[in-house]
Amino acid sequence: MCWQAMTDISPTETVHEMKSIFSIRPSYENTLTIGADKVFQLFKKNSKAMVFVDYEYWFYSYRNLFQIKPDPKRFHEALIKEFDIADIMIFGDFSDLPISAELGKLRNITNTIIETGNRFPRHKKDMTDFVMLDYIYRCVDDNKNIGTYIIFSGKVTSSLS
């Protein structure tokens, strides 16, 4: 299951009613019902949380599927209500428009923005997943005081990018 939570969803709302808040792979849309408050209840605010965001996936999914842009400020506000955030790490290839125009909004919630672009024309590959996974492994190994890891990601297919 691939989902991305924002904020303020009651447990009774269906996936179909919350498309602008949750992004769920289309094959699951008619079978899932979940509320952000239920997901957040699984974790306690008393432990530190580390957040990893595949912004490239989030941005292009929202743009291509819903014709909207992500709202990082709203996402950040929802997270800090529920978690003691140690850091939010944003990953993506920000080398081209339109995603490069999003950097100002992202800097308002974190300074930890990792550029994953690859400028080798013969070997063009999306490196975001690999770079993000490397940072997650390092964080788990280096930060024993982090109790919750929030991974905001998904799978981008060629039709989304």
Image: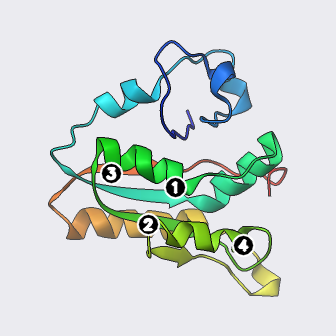
Q: What residue type is disc 4 on?
A: Ala
Label of residue 101 in the image: 4
Cα distance in 3D space between marks 2 and 3: 11 Å
Label of residue 89 in the image: 2
Dot 3 and dot 4 residues touching (CB under 8 Å):
no
Q: Secondary structure at mark 2?
A: strand
Occupied quadrant, residue 22: top right
Q: Secondary structure at mark 3?
A: strand
Cα distance in 3D space between marks 3 and 4: 28 Å
Please state the horizontal and vertical placement of residue 63, each as a whole percent of the image.
78, 50
The residue at the point 51 percent across, 48 percent down is 74
Q: Earlier in the sequence, mark 1 or mark 3?
A: 1
Label of residue 149 in the image: 3
Cα distance in 3D space between marks 1 and 2: 14 Å
Q: Earlier in the sequence, mark 2 or mark 4?
A: 2
Please state the horizontal and vertical placement of residue 143, each as a whole percent of the image.
20, 66
Cα distance in 3D space between marks 2 and 4: 18 Å
Cα distance in 3D space between marks 1 and 4: 15 Å
Q: What residue type is disc 1 on?
A: Lys
**Pick the front one: 134 or 85:** 85
Decide: few, some or many residues near mark 4? Use Cα within 10 Å; few <14, some 14-19, many ≥20: few
Please state the horizontal and vertical placement of residue 108, each as a whole percent of the image.
49, 68
Q: Earlier in the sequence, mark 1 or mark 2?
A: 1
Q: Secondary structure at mark 1?
A: helix
Note whether residue 78 is visible. yes
Q: Secondary structure at mark 4?
A: helix
* Residue holding disc 1: 73
Cα distance in 3D space between marks 1 and 3: 19 Å
The residue at the point 60 percent across, 52 percent down is 71
In the visual, does 93 lie left or right of 90? right
Decide: few, some or many residues near mark 1? Use Cα within 10 Å; few <14, some 14-19, many ≥20: some
Q: Earlier in the sequence, mark 3 or mark 4?
A: 4
